[in-house]
Image (cartoon, rainbow, N blue to C red):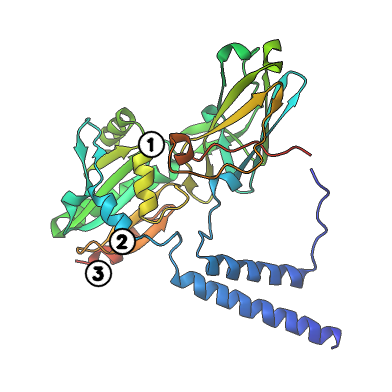
Amino acid sequence: MTKTQKSLVFVTVALLALVAGLALRGTGTPTGAPQPAAIASAFVTPLSTPDGGKASLSQWKGKVLVVNFWATWCAPCRKEIPDFIRLQESLGSRGVQFVGIAVDEADKVAAFVREVGLNYPTLVGELDAVEIARAMGNELGALPYTVVFDRDGNVVQVELGGTNEAKLRPVLTSLL
Amino acid sequence: MGAERPALPARRRVLALALAAVAQAAAGATPEFLDTRQAFRLSAEMQGRDALIRFRIAPGYYLYRDKLHLTVEPASAAAGPARLPKGGIRQDEFFGRVEVYHDALEVRLPLGRDAMRGQLRIRVRSQGCAEAGVCYPPRDDILEVRDGAFVVPAEPVRRGRESLLDQLGGAVPPERQP
């Protein structure tokens, strides 16, 4: 093979590999696949509320549910929350329910809820919250992590890292 | 630190990148973000009576200086506070001016004479983020010092589901020093 031919083979293989890589990546979720059994169990796991009570996700079954894992110490989490507040405001009456799960301390969460005027409930946890995030496919335990469920409790979308109103609104309205 | 790797010819770099993309996608792993242990690699060694705790921080990741806490158990084994180097300034949209570490970090922790005999533990709490927009929960690493040397278990400690520390990032053994 001449040098030019070798180069051509390299470039072709590289391009094919890149295309294959992007195609595969497009079909997969950015995290480990959420397991239905683990999710079912996560829904009934009681977590704390910022005021010291207990609650689990199961009470919002039947809604188009957006579960957002966040923390007050997590800047990218803080950044996306105003978008969630707007979406809850505009789509709440049609059956969308945002629920936060903070990997944090209850008093810090309570203060933040007041500060930003959070218009949807948030639960609080440490290990238990991380465990629920894992059950929902967040292998790294990193934040923010957002999972969209349809009314039947199926996972429709997961997002590791910040999301926003423009990305979420079409997904949510398609489920209503 | 090893010698710098020679630059690959451009076309091989392209090939390597493309193959890496395939491997990542095929493995179904998170392509964008590293596991906390890969993002923030911890190692430790003794230098005289000082414990040197190092983090090697992956490009695009950072640790917060004010979230870095070292505690010695028993507390009497410490001969002074941990000396944290100066970090770089990050202007954060929410937290204002914060000091952060990129690339590498070395903390010097002076230990007392007694630390050279018997056993002690150094608990390293750290917290960091990726520039690309995720943060990792606070992580606790526990390093064991026995008779003046870091204990390196024969096998890496695997992430378990039993302990709180494991859940929040895991207790890892110090890496062997060259």
Residue extending furthest toward the right: A2
Q: Is residue A86 visible?
A: no
> In which quadrant will I find the C terminus of chain B?
top right
Q: Which amino acid, mark 3?
A: Ser
N-terminal label among 3 and 2: 2
Q: CA distance from mark 3 to mark 1?
A: 30 Å
Name the residue beneath numbered marker 3.
Answer: A174
Secondary structure under tag 1 reads loop
Q: State whether discs 3 and 1 lie on one chain.
A: yes
Mark 3 / mark 1, whichever is N-terminal: 1
Distance between mark 1 and mark 2 Cα atoms: 29 Å
Task: Please tell me which residue is depicted at 48% across the width and 48% down the height of the picture.
Answer: B134
Left or right for B110, reference B68: right
Q: Are marks 3 and 1 in contact (CB under 8 Å)?
A: no
Determine whether label 3 and label 2 are within 8 Å by CB. no
Residue A4 in the image: above or below residue A74: below
Q: Nearer the viewer, mark 1 or mark 2?
A: 2
Where does residue B126 sit, x and y in percent of width and height?
Answer: 54, 33
Query: On the image, numbered disc 1 is attached to which residue?
Result: A72
Nearer the N terminus, badge 1 or badge 2?
Answer: 2
Amino acid of disc 2:
Pro
Where residue A36 is drawn, which disc sits there?
A: 2
Chain that bears disc 1: A
